[in-house]
């Protein structure tokens, strides 16, 4: 049967090639689209977690707005002890994040003041790698690194002093002077224009918090461990007034973007599948009408109706397999090429407003999605063959033999 | 007790509906036709165009079902079998030769001949050997690997004959097998069918309206307006 099916497919080679080409192009386009969107999503998550969020955060349990924690962890030591013992945790560090005012003799700007443990922070985020003048925070209490856009607006140079003001824990207005030891450039308008990093001790002095912090940021061995580690930590810290948050609890807008992109991808997928299905349906129906008499002959010499149905389905499966293999090859070539050459995406420019996000995306394979698309193309090719196959198997042999 | 005939048609009536439902007209193709064929016969069904020859052959060949009456093979009723069982019956017991040869164009001559054996599930080596043997009987062993479009009409019909007998059927039903052939080729094909009948005891029932062809049959059944005229 397979030999007959294969030869029937090759009988009108041009028509079969057009069908196979449309399937292959459709599948390659789907794979490219999946790879592009998944690469952007992966990059977005990586950049968000690498720049600021980390994989997990421990915050005061009563905080509702996780991005701007307005309450403190009174006693971080037990949390640190639990984290030190927790499997899967690569690094963790305490932070205080507050909004405040940064002033120089040239002026003042509102800023996000990020007080960090410098040595630990280097293991959690990649901000130190963006320093392009001076150095990252060292051991001194009154050092600061800030973005080049703040430095430009406040006309600051390395070694100069900057005054940071913020509302202290006791309600008073705290003010401390910090010496600029480093200036970074991430390419992100928000990070370069609104963030200033100071040592945790300096931040605690500024805000009069004592040993209190409002975040403990955690980097895991693998981002995929977030769910499990969170569950285990939550159990261990159950009696403490803290909550363990996953990266997507904090950066929920990334999840919303992902959901939106995936929905668009699904719609595109549906449209491509519809085109593929119609292509196959058209090819098989034309082939069926041309071969009604042949089906009659096959039935006359003893082919069962179900056998005739299987023959038509086999032809469709052959078309589907060839189209899938060619589409897979073309898709792999496209993704491999743009994985090396990179793809300039305007969305990268847009996202870089919020995060240090590159405008060139290097595509990566998204096999979980690709396999789904491959399977769907094959299933669609079989489903599209069902109407002509059923029609063929319902033919009356004597009428089919009279067909002109 | 005498042995049952190979084929028995009993009061076979067939009516077709032609035209759209609104203007549908009923055409009676066969009216209460009863006849028998014995094993080893070389018989013809004769009649003008529209007399019901093809309809009778189709019903005898289980390609169509009568509205009333029945067809029996060696006493077994086969005219109202469900389509899969009718296909199985044809596969084991019947061979067909058509006016327009009706070979599968994407298969070579020998692949066409062996196709009934493919459907029977015979192993590749066995069916190829049998197909080549039968192609030798019809004088086409050297054309085995040619596609039908590279064969003459007479050669294609010989391939069709080989396909009809390759699986050792009880009877070969041939619907106007010489209608598309010139008189010389037609005579040669009839020689072949006759020799297969005499030397290998294969039963042939064929239809024709050509007196030259009918003169070769040992028994001629005449149909006129769907009724048996004389035998």
Image (tube, helix red, strand yellow):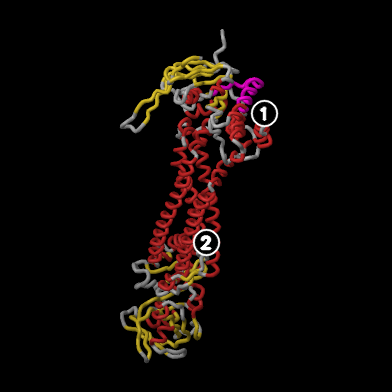
B189 within the magenta span: yes
Please give the residue where the numbered disc 2 appears in the rendered image. A365
Q: Which residues are magenta?
A: B188-206
Q: Position of residue A57 (x, y in %)?
A: 43, 68
Determine the residue positioned at 53% across, 63% down.
Answer: A334
Q: Where residue B221 sits: x, y (%)?
A: 51, 17
- Extreme residue in the bottom direction: A105
- Residue B68 in view, yes or no: yes
What label sits on residue B137 in the rendered view? 1
Residue B207 in magenta?
no
Q: Give the percent coordinates (x, y) of residue B163.
A: 60, 31
Q: Position of residue A390 (x, y in %)?
A: 45, 38
Badge 2 element: loop
Give the letter of the chain under mark 2: A
Give me the C-alpha separation between circle 2 and circle 1.
Answer: 61 Å
Left or right: where B6 falls relative to B129: left
């Amino acid at each position: 049967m397979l030999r007959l099916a294969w030869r029937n497919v090759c009988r009108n080679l041009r028509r079969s090639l057009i069908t196979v080409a449309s399937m292959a192009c459709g599948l390659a386009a789907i794979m490219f689209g999946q790879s592009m969107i998944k690469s952007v999503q992966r990059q977005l998550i990586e950049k968000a977690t690498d720049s600021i969020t980390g994989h997990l955060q421990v915050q005061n349990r009563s905080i509702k707005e996780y991005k701007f924690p307005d309450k403190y962890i009174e006693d971080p030591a037990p949390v640190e002890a639990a984290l030190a013992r927790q499997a899967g945790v690569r690094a963790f560090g305490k932070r205080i994040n507050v909004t405040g005012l940064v002033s120089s003799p040239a002026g003042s700007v509102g800023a996000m003041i990020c007080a960090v443990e410098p040595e630990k922070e280097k293991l959690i985020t990649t901000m130190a790698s963006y320093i392009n003048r001076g150095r990252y925070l060292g051991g001194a209490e009154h050092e600061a690194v800030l973005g080049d856009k703040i430095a430009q607006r406040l006309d600051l140079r390395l070694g100069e002093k900057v005054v940071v003001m913020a509302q202290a824990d006791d309600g008073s207005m705290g003010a401390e002077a910090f010496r600029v030891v480093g200036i970074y450039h991430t390419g992100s308008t928000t990070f370069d224009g609104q963030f200033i990093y100071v040592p945790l001790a300096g931040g605690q002095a500024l805000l009069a918090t004592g040993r209190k912090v409002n975040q403990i940021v955690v980097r895991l061995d693998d981002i995929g461990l977030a769910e499990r580690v969170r569950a285990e930590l939550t159990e261990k810290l159950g009696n403490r007034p803290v909550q363990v948050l996953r990266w997507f609890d904090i950066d929920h807008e990334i999840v919303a973007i992902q959901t939106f992109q995936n929905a668009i991808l699904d719609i595109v997928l549906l449209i491509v599948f519809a085109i593929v299905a119609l292509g196959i349906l058209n090819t098989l129906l034309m082939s069926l009408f041309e071969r009604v008499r042949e089906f009659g002959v096959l039935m006359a010499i003893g082919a069962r109706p179900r056998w005739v149905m299987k023959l038509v389905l086999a032809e469709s499966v052959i078309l589907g397999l060839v189209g899938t293999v060619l589409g897979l090859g073309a898709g792999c070539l496209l993704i491999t090429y743009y994985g090396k050459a990179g793809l300039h995406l305007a969305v990268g420019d847009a996202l870089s407003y919020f995060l240090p996000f590159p405008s060139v995306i290097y595509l990566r394979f998204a096999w979980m999605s690709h396999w789904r698309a491959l399977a769907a193309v094959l299933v669609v090719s079989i489903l599209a063959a069902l109407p002509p196959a059923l029609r063929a198997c319902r033919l009356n042999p004597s009428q089919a033999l009279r067909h002109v | 007790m005498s042995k049952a005939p190979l084929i028995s048609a009993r009061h076979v009536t067939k009516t077709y509906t032609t035209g759209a439902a609104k203007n549908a007209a009923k055409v009676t193709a066969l009216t209460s036709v009863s006849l028998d064929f014995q094993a080893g016969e070389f018989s013809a069904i004769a009649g003008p165009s529209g007399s019901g020859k093809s309809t009778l052959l189709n019903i005898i060949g289980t390609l169509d079902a009568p509205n009333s009456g029945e067809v029996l093979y060696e006493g077994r009723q086969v005219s109202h079998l469900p389509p899969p069982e009718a296909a199985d019956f044809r596969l084991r017991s019947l061979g067909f030769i058509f006016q327009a040869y009706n070979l599968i164009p994407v298969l070579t001559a020998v692949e066409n001949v062996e196709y009934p054996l493919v459907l029977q599930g015979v192993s590749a080596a066995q069916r190829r050997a049998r197909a080549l043997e039968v192609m030798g009987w019809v004088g086409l062993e050297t054309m085995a690997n040619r596609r039908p479009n590279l064969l003459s009409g007479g050669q294609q019909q010989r391939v069709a004959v080989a396909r009809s007998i390759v699986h050792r059927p009880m009877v070969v039903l041939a619907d106007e097998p010489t209608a598309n052939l010139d008189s010389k080729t037609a005579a040669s094909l009839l020689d072949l069918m006759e020799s297969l009948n005499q030397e290998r005891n294969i039963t042939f029932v064929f239809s024709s309206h050509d007196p030259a062809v009918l003169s070769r049959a040992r028994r001629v059944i005449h149909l006129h307006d769907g009724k048996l005229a004389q035998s």
